[in-house]
Image (tube, rainbow, N blue to C red):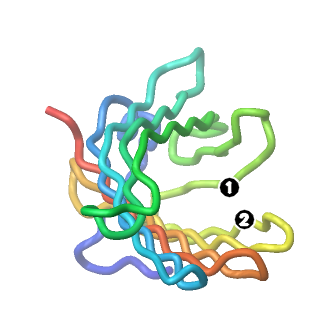
Amino acid sequence: MGNPENAFCISDLKGFLQGSWSLERSIEDHRARQSGRLGGDASFTAAGADLVYQEEGRLVIGDPASPVYAGPVLQSYLYAFPVPSKAEVRFRDGRFFHALDLSNGPWACTHLCDPDRYEGEFTVLDADTWRVVWTVTGPRKEQRLDSTYRRAL
């Protein structure tokens, strides 16, 4: 990915991420022909040299007046930093998820979750806002998850 003029470069990724964030996510499930929204909070908390990512929120799938699902969601990942500008993101069980490097602006990555494919695009919009778009394709899923993080004040 090139660096659009409105994207920021982050040389200290750990310093940028650490702290609390508000989270808004839209979900489009093309296969199920459903959409959803998640609103919540995310935090990156120090754990030795790493950061632990914790996400908590409320997910509503379908019409908010009569949802297919409405309830709490939790997610967590471990971010290890081999160098200040790069992270290795791992699932809770230690499996590798993806790399992250925003030192040259936007970052694209792929995660193969056989038989599905996750294509991620990460962009820092300003000093307090960043966005992640995951496009998921495969025999089990056809989804787009668009998340915006805003630094909690």
> Which amino acid, by three-letter code, is at mark 2?
His
Q: Position of residue 136 (x, y in %)?
A: 62, 75
Res. 28 in view: yes
Front residue (pair 82, 147)? 147
Rendered view: 122 above or below 42: below
Front residue (pair 82, 73)? 73
Does 82 sit left or right of 153 as displayed? Answer: right
Separation of residues labelled 1 and 2 (CA atoms): 6 Å
The residue sitting at the left extreme is: 153
Label 1, residues with CA under 10 Å away: few <14, some 14-19, many ≥20: some
Front residue (pair 17, 133)? 133
The residue sitting at the front extreme is: 66
Rendered view: 69 above or below 17: below
Query: Which of marks 2 and 1 precedes in the sequence?
Result: 1
Q: Position of residue 74 (x, y in %)?
A: 51, 37
Front residue (pair 134, 50)? 134
Does 59 sit left or right of 121 as displayed? Answer: left
Q: Residue at x 48, y 32 (%)?
A: 54
> Which amino acid, by three-letter code, is at mark 1?
His
Q: Residue at x 30, y 55 (%)?
A: 24
Task: Give the residue pinned by disc 1.
Answer: 98
Label 2, residues with CA under 10 Å away: few <14, some 14-19, many ≥20: some
Rendered view: 58 above or below 35: above
Occupied quadrant, residue 109: bottom right
Q: Residue at x 66, y 38 (%)?
A: 82
Do callouts 1 and 2 mark residues in contact (Cβ within 8 Å)? yes
Task: Give the residue pinned by disc 2.
Answer: 111
